[in-house]
Image (cartoon, helix red, strand yellow):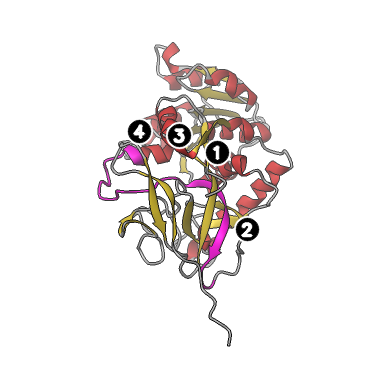
Amino acid sequence: MSSPVEGPSVITCRAAVAWGPGKPLVLEEVQVDPPKAMEIRIKVVCTSLCRSDVTQWESMAQPDLFPRIFGHEASGIVESVGEGVSEFEVGDHVLTLFIGECTRCKQCVSGKSNMCQVLGLERKGVMHSDQKTRFSIKGKPVYHYCAVSSFSEYTVVHSGCAVKISATAPMEKICLLSCGAAAGLGAAWKVADISEGSTVVIFGLGSVGLSVAQGAKLRGAHRIIGVDTNPEKCEKGKSFGITDFINPNDHDEPIQQVVKRMTDGGADYAFECIGDTSMISAALQSCCDGWGLTVTLGVPKSKPEVSAHYALLLSGRTLKGSLLGGWKPKTELPQLVDKYLQKGIEIDALVSHNLPFEDINTAFNLMREGKCLRCVIHMPKSS
């Protein structure tokens, strides 16, 4: 008589746990539950630090969602699968997705959006399916972030919040396509649909802004103006397509006036990549009358409300938001991975630091001090 097949069990591993807003992360032993129905458990290989991780870690808006495990931009290998999962097998290489794609809801089938009514952006620190956590320390729950929580050696995600990728893709590079690099490229290609010969201005030359610049360059934009207070971004920007650099600290007049003078009345496209809602009005004013388009894709650190004079819109300008660059995560991100493997897009130069998991607080400090683009955190291979 055959014995019953046992399913996956609880895993004890290390995770970087935030015990309170802005408090240094602590490497703790956590228990990670087996995947439930339509979930997969992933061994995280590499995870990069995104500005939104830092913003939410510092924020006092949700003090009850601690202890918490941040991280959402990651690559890994499927360790086990839950009931009903058919698209993944143990050993598959995957990217995590901070917004999922169920493929069945109104938004998913519309062909007009990358939003998902079932697996949209998760803000409560729990799993989409049962509103519970899969992490715990000594029996007490530890909250998730964006239903991913990749600052852990193992994590559990809904199968709709991961996408299978080529096993030949380098994990330490390709993880950037699960958020930052994809967000910038998509903002340029899908959301703005930049036209050849156009003029573009980009506010903020972090990894997202540089990816926007790369997308604009590949679309044949004639002039790509980068705006940043860090003078070191000038040289870095050139390699991604920046043709002109403006440091607001070098000018006594509003930056939008500088841009308008440089562009004979305003750029065709403006991108706000800082996460500062006060800059959205400046970006709108940097665009030309009639058809100027401003795309905002930065996550605000404070003051989420947007304020702009109605005349900016009345004169024909458009303001659009962008999440993950408009990409449908499961059906379209694999195309970006393939494009990278074919050397059609640059990702490697966005990685400024490679750090071991033990140095994750160093990564946070580098981001806060503006001394990095993307810090890629490498998990122990033996975990």
Chain-order first, disc 1 or disc 3: 1
Q: Amino acid at mark 2?
A: Asp
Q: Is residue 168 above or below residue 301?
A: below
- Identified at 65% across, 43% down, the residue is 170
Q: CA distance from mark 4 to mark 3?
A: 45 Å
Residue holding disc 1? 184
Quadrant where the image shows the N terminus: bottom right
Q: Is residue 164 above or below residue 324?
A: below
Q: What element does badge 1 sit on?
A: helix
Q: What element does badge 2 sit on?
A: loop
* Mark 3 neighbour class, 10 Å CA radius: few under 14, some 14 to 19, many 20 or more: some
Of marks 2 and 3, the one in the foreground: 3
Residue holding disc 4? 309
Q: CA distance from mark 2 to mark 3?
A: 27 Å
Q: Are marks 4 and 2 in contact (CB under 8 Å)?
A: no
Q: Position of residue 8 (x, y in %)?
A: 50, 67
Which of the numbered marks, if any, corresponds to residue 92?
2
- Left or right of 151: which side holds 86? right
Q: CA distance from mark 4 to mark 2?
A: 50 Å
318 inside magenta stretch? no
Chain-order first, disc 4 or disc 1: 1
Q: Amino acid at mark 4?
A: His
Of marks 4 and 1, the one in the foreground: 1
Q: Residue furthest bottom?
A: 1
Of marks 4 and 2, the one in the foreground: 2
